[in-house]
């Protein structure tokens, strides 16, 4: 038995890399894919884009419905106008958005990233232009490897021109939330816009062009903090895009009519389509990875292959780690309930704060040069400056009165007609007979009322002795 058995060395199949996602210079060529989840993503993306573009064009009286006028420090949301004093609402809104993201992520994973994140939506738009101008993923790869000639230059020029046009249109749509849209478009294209507006539009144009055209998933994997802390919200019952390893392994190619069990193979034919369609360039068969944005492209690609092979769909699917391990998924669990309760409390607080926003504001400024004066009749006078803000989008009639003094003279108007969204400054004087004063330093309340709304602001009436 001294003869050695001849052994043939077999090299394992090497998968062509989709691109090194950790190397910004290594470009990922994303293959186009159709399917139910890509159709859903497309519809949701279009809904998001159309809303983003059209909202500034919705009229509301003499202005647009949503206008964040930073210069005038007025933030209009349809019939509601907020001032810097109301920015507590903005804090509540961001807290609500954060906990809503936590709740959705714990339940459904990174569906925000895959379906509605602006970075993802605009990246797919740019990829669509690539496909229409340069061709499929393989054609784009070959085109990049070719030396520069007239045809390649024209395609590259046309692609980048389209990217810049979309970026400029996006930047103008974003700026229209801060500058009246009609004024913005006319002044920008006639070179009459201010330096701040021009800089903002050009900055966001270049930012969109760089993020969606060049950086793409680098933003998601290296810059977006959400990808880093999402694992704190995930658990084994969170719905993710997962590969059923028990069903798919041992993977390998085979003929369509071959029996995989007889060949010792699983359902995965190792076609690599799941890798080729992934915008992040990962292989979902390697397990859960933080780069996965749950867009479902690999699910649609795998389902097409399973259908062609007459295998059941769902080798790659939205599932949970517990489900992949053969255990029961628990939808209702303490972490999800906790996020839901906190979210509910914050939403209630936000709604209460919103409902308590008054359409007016009153500030009292005492005359600091003279605490009091005595007039010719011997009465004590205190002067005040009333700062009244009409926050509504219509002119309002305001009534002023005073509490805390029994007998006094109001020197100045007590009925004011204030235009919409206006800060009105009104000096007034209160005169009181000193014999009517119980104390040399009394607290008084100025009352502002209009259309059923009432505000009180405290101040002091000083007589000196």
Image (cartoon, rainbow, N blue to C red):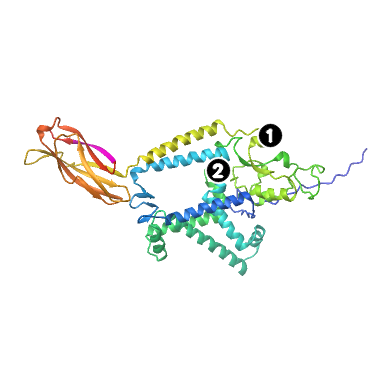
- Can residue 425 be spotted in the picture? yes
Single out the residue that lies furthest toward the front: 452
Query: Marks 1 and 2: in contact by CB < 8 Å?
Result: no
Q: Position of residue 130 (x, y in %)?
A: 59, 60
| The disc label shown at residue 326, or none | 1
Apparent side of residue 255 relative to residue 150 in the rendered image (left or right): right
In this picture, which residue range is highlighted in magenta?
453-460
Q: Which residue sits at x=57%, y=33%?
A: 332
Task: Give 215 or 321, whichever is nearer the viewer.
Answer: 321
Mark 2 or mark 1, earlier in chain? 2
Q: Which residue sits at x=22%, y=48%?
A: 416
Task: Give 46 or 135, whichever is nearer the viewer.
Answer: 46
Screen quadrant of the N terminus: top right
Position of 55 relative to 268 (above/below):
below
Residue beneath disc 2:
227
Q: Position of residue 439 (x, y in %)?
A: 15, 30
Q: Secondary structure at mark 2?
A: helix
Q: Position of residue 322 (x, y in %)?
A: 64, 34
């Amino acid at each position: 038995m001294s003869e050695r058995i001849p052994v043939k060395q077999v090299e394992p199949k090497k998968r062509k890399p989709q691109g090194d996602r950790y190397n910004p210079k290594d470009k990922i060529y994303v293959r186009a894919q159709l399917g139910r989840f890509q159709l859903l993503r497309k519809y949701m993306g279009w809904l998001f884009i159309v809303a983003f573009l059209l909202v500034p064009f919705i009229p509301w009286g003499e202005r647009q419905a949503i206008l964040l006028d930073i210069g005038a420090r007025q933030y209009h949301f349809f019939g509601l106008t907020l001032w810097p004093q109301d920015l507590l609402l903005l804090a509540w809104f961001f807290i609500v958005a954060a906990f809503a993201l936590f709740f959705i992520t714990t339940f459904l994973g990174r569906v925000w990233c895959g379906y509605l994140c602006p970075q993802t939506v605009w990246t797919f738009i740019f990829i669509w232009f690539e496909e229409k101008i340069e061709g499929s993923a393989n054609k784009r790869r070959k085109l990049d490897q070719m030396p520069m000639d007239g045809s390649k230059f024209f395609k590259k020029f046309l692609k980048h021109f389209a990217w810049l046009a979309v970026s400029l249109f996006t930047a103008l749509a974003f700026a229209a939330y801060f500058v009246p849209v009609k004024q913005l478009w006319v002044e920008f294209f006639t070179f009459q816009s201010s330096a701040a507006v021009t800089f903002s539009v050009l900055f966001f144009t270049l930012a969109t062009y760089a993020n969606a055209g060049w950086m793409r998933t680098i933003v998601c994997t290296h810059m977006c903090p959400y990808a880093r802390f999402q694992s704190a919200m995930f658990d084994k019952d969170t719905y993710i895009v997962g590969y059923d390893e028990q069903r798919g392994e041992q993977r390998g190619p085979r003929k369509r009519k071959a029996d995989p069990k007889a060949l010792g193979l699983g359902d995965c034919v190792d076609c690599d389509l799941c890798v080729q369609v992934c915008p992040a360039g990962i292989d979902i068969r390697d397990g859960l990875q933080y780069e996965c944005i749950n867009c479902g492209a690999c699910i649609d690609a795998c389902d097409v292959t399973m259908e062609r092979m007459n295998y059941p769909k769902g080798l790659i699917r939205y599932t949970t780690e517990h489900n992949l391990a053969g255990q029961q998924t628990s939808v209702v669990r303490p972490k999800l309930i906790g996020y839901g309760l906190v979210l509910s409390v914050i939403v209630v607080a936000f709604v209460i704060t919103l409902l308590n926003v008054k359409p007016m504001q009153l500030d009292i400024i005492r005359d600091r040069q003279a605490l009091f004066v005595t007039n010719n009749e011997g009465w004590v006078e205190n002067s005040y400056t009333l700062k009244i803000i009409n926050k509504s989008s219509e002119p309002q009639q305001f009534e002023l009165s005073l509490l805390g003094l029994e007998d006094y003279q109001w020197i100045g108007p007590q009925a004011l007609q204030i235009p919409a969204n206006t800060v009105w400054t009104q000096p007034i004087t209160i005169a009181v007979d000193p014999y009517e004063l119980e104390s040399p330093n009394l607290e008084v309340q100025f009352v502002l009322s209009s259309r059923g709304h009432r505000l009180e602001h405290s101040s002091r009436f000083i007589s000196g002795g």
